[in-house]
Amino acid sequence: MNELTVNDLHLDYGSGAHTNPILKGVSMHLQKGEVVALLGPSGSGKTTLLRAVAGLESAKSGTIDIGERRVFDGSRAFEMPAEQRNLGLVFQSYALWPHKTVFDNVAYGLKLRKMGTSEIKERVDEVLKQLGLGHLGERFPHQLSGGQQQRVAIARALVYNPPVILLDEPLSNLDAKLREEARAFLRELIVRLGLSALMVTHDQAEAMAISDRILLLNNGKIEQQGTPQSMYETPDTLFTAEFMGSNNRLPARIVQRNGAAVRLDVNGVALNATARGASGGKEPSTIIRVEEVKISASPVDNALQLPLLTCMYLGDRWECLFKGADGSELSLRAYSKYRLEPGSYWLQLPADKLWVF
C-alpha cells in the first residue's frame, strides 16, 4: 500500500498576470519502507513539492493522500493543517531550539501532543539510543558537532512514529567527509527502522546512495523516475543523462542511422554509437560518461586519437584531459590508474556507452 500519493499537483506563486507556475501536474507515490529522492536543479520544484506534502505550501489543484487520509483536495478546496498531517520533518538548517537540551528538543512535539511525562521519557530515550545519541541528552545544540545536530533533528522527526519522514537537503550543511559518513548512517537507519522517506537533494550521488527510487524534476515536471541504477545506466533523455553523471560531450555529425545503431563522424573519424532518446533540441547531442572512456597507448576499435593535455590527481585515480589540435572543439576527459606520460593516446568509446540524444 502507498504511504503517500500525490496526484496531478499544480502549484503557482503570485496571482493574476504575475502567476508563476512551480509544479505543473506532478504525480508520485511512496510505498511503505521505501525511500524516494526528489532530485533536480535549483528551481525545478523539488522543495516546493516536499513543502506541499508537509502542508507548508498551498497547492492550486490535485490531491495528496497520506495512507488512506486525504490531506489536500484542490477540487473541494480542502487542506488539512500541517500539524494534523503527522509527518516527520527534517529541515536543511536542523531548526533546533538553541536554549533547549537535546532531550527537550526531541520531546518538544510530544509535549505539544499532551503526552504523559513517563511515556515522553521512554520514547525520547528510545529514539536517542537508536541514533547513537543516548549519552548526549543533557547537552545543548551548540555543544554538538554538525553531524550530531543533524541526528537530533532526525530524532525529533522520528519520535512520534510518523508514517512518512520528509527530509529537505538533510546533509547539505555537513562537510564532504562527514556527509559521506552521514549518508551511510542515514541509509542504514532508514532500512533498520523500515521508514518511508521522501528526501529532497540536488546531489545525484547522495540520491543514488540513499534512495530506492529517484524522481528527477525539471522545470516543475517529472523528467524521469526509476531506480538509481536505471536512471544512471539507461537515461531516457539528455537532461537525465547530463544530470545523473559526469559526461564528455562530443561535436558529432550523424552519418547513418539504423534503429538504435548510429554511425557518427567526429572530426573526420567514423564512430559507432547508440541512439537513446530525445534531446529536446533540434541538433542531436552526443555524450559518454567519463568513466566509460578507455585509454590505450596503441590503436583500438571505435577510438579517437588525441594528445594528452594534463592529468589531475584525485587520490584513487588520475583524471586526464585530452584536447584536439588548435581550433578543435574536441576535448575528452578519462580516468587512469596511473599518471600518463606526455604524448598521444587512443581513447576508446564503446558503442553502447556512446549515446546520441
Image: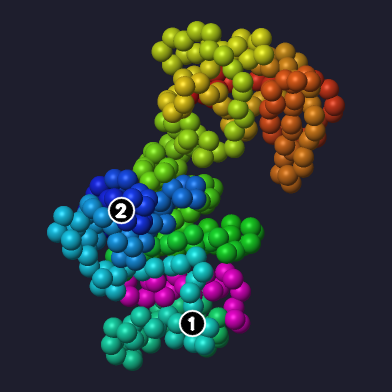
Question: Of all residues shown, which one is farthest toward the right?
Answer: 342
Q: Mark 1 points at which residue?
A: 97
Q: Is residue 301 above or below residue 349?
A: above
Along the horizontal axis of the image, is 303 left or right of 257? Answer: right
Mark pair 2, 1: CA separation:
39 Å
Q: Which of the two residues, 64 or 245, is positioned nearer the viewer here? A: 64
- Residue 60, image x and y in percent? 26, 55
Q: In what element is the residue under mark 2?
A: helix
Res 339 → quadrant: top right
**Amino acid type of disc 2?**
Gly
Q: Is the magenta stretch mostly helix, strand or loop?
A: helix
Residue placed at 41% from the left, 13% from the top? 259
Along the horizontal axis of the image, is 235 left or right of 205? Answer: left
Q: Which of marks 2 and 1 is in front?
A: 2
Residue placed at 45% from the left, 24% from the top? 276
- Check residue 347 for magenta coloring: no
Q: In this view, does 82 lie above or below 7?
A: below
Q: Mark 2 points at which residue?
A: 16
Structural crowding at the residue carrying mark 1, measured as other residues with C-alpha within 10 Å and reported as few (<14), some (14–19) or many (≥20): some
Question: Of all residues shown, which one is farthest toward the bottom?
Answer: 117
Q: Which of the two residues, 117 or 73, is positioned nearer the viewer here? A: 73
Q: Is residue 138 above or below residue 45?
A: below
- Residue 5, image x and y in percent? 25, 53
Structural crowding at the residue carrying mark 2, measured as other residues with C-alpha within 10 Å and reported as few (<14), some (14–19) or many (≥20): few
Q: Give the range drawn in magenta.
A: 142-161
